[in-house]
Image (cartoon, rainbow, N blue to C red):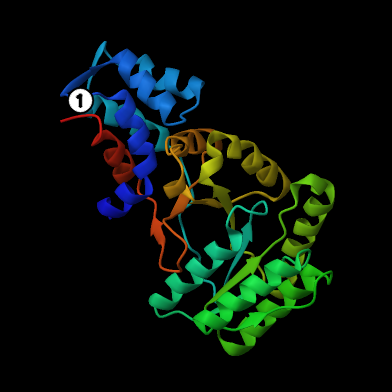
């Protein structure tokens, strides 16, 4: 797992190496601030992390300061519902479709059955891409033509899962934030229809955030959370950016679980997020 985090945070750690000339047992408070800002931790959070630290900072002090960001109450529970219905939310280009394939693959590896719902009916490309993944992973999909009612896809997918005894339902959604009012109403309707098909559904609304956008993705998250309430986060594309410190900012601002990190383009490239391993991977580049 540590090796995977090292791969994901490779570019972030390369950026840190430009600040850290050589590893030491202690660094100055000012150096620590430079490192945090270089990794795209937002300024206000960086200042808070430094507040209680002495002028010379060792690894344990740095770790305790950073891990404090993740000490909030969050609901990590997975309901025992069958089917367990997840709705995948996020702007276009964040990696929703690829992430759905990764979740589906993960559940398959756990011996669970999966069905997909192509609920982004706004874009024909989204339906086609998800259908290709379904074929590749040999799992069923409920899909319709571009422009059709996405709520009908939600209903049909859950009904099919119930009829076939399928364990997991994963539903894609549109992500066109530039028509926010329409999108908000569409997502709310999809959620209502899911609840009509199965009480308590969707059991989890998962937001996909593009790691390359760094701390700026927080505003997206807040917009979606205000619309429908988000239950958890998956961060994609962190391996392609030096903004790995933004994970701290995201956790601090949103106070909700980060469930997974995407580590590449293939279905197997998804790992559970573990705050201590994430922080230690960064600190390995700073301290002896």
User: In which quarter of the view is residue 48 placed?
Assistant: top left
Percent position (x, y) of residue 285?
Answer: 25, 34
- Screen quadrant of the N terminus: bottom left
Percent position (x, y) of residue 113?
Answer: 49, 81
Q: How many callouts does the rendering have?
A: 1
Q: Is residue 168 above or below residue 174?
A: below
Q: In this view, does 182 lie above or below 202?
A: above
Left or right for 188, reference 45? right
Residue drawn 60% across and 59% down? 96
Q: Which residue lies furthest to the top in this view?
A: 55
Residue drawn 46% across and 37% down? 243
Left or right for 73, reference 149? left
In this rendered view, identify the residue nearer to me: 103 or 130.
Answer: 130
In this rendered view, identify the residue nearer to me: 46 or 269.
Answer: 269
Q: Rate crowding at label 1 as few (under 14), some (14 to 19) or many (20 or more) other CA atoms within 10 Å.
A: few
Left or right for 93, reference 30? right
In this rendered view, identify the residue nearer to me: 150 or 41.
Answer: 41
User: In which quarter of the view is residue 46 placed?
Assistant: top left
Residue drawn 49% across and 50% down? 237
- Screen quadrant of the C terminus: top left
Q: Is residue 115 visible?
A: no
Residue that badge 1 annotates: 22
Percent position (x, y) of residue 251?
Answer: 48, 38
Percent position (x, y) of residue 111?
Answer: 40, 80
């Amino acid at each position: 797992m540590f090796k995977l985090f090292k791969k994901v945070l490779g570019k972030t750690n390369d950026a840190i190496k430009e600040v850290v000339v050589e590893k030491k047992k202690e660094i100055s408070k000012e150096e620590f601030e430079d490192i945090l800002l270089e990794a795209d931790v937002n300024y206000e959070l960086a200042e808070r992390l430094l507040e209680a630290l002495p002028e010379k900072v060792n690894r344990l002090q740095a770790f305790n300061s950073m891990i404090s960001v993740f000490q909030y109450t969050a609901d990590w529970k997975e309901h025992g519902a069958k089917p367990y219905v997840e709705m995948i939310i996020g702007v276009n280009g964040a990696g929703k479709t690829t992430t759905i394939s990764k979740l589906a693959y993960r559940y398959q590896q756990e011996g669970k059955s999966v069905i997909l719902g192509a609920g982004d009916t706004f874009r024909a490309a989204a339906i086609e891409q998800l259908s290709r993944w379904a074929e590749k992973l040999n799992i069923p999909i409920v899909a319709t033509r571009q422009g059709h009612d996405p709520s009908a896809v939600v209903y049909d997918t859950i009904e099919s899962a119930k009829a076939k005894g399928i364990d997991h339902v994963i539903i894609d959604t549109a992500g066109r934030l530039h028509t926010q009012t329409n999108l908000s109403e569409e997502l709310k309707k999809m959620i209502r229809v899911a609840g009509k098909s199965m009480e308590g559904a969707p059991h989890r609304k998962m937001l996909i955030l593009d790691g390359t956008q760094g701390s700026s993705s927080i505003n997206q998250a807040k917009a979606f959370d205000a619309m429908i309430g988000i239950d958890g986060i998956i961060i994609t594309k962190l391996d392609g950016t030096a903004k790995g410190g933004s994970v701290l900012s995201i956790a601090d601002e949103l106070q909700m679980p980060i469930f997974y990190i995407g580590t590449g383009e293939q279905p197997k490239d998804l790992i559970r997020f573990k705050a201590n391993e994430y922080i230690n991977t960064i600190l390995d580049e700073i301290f002896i």
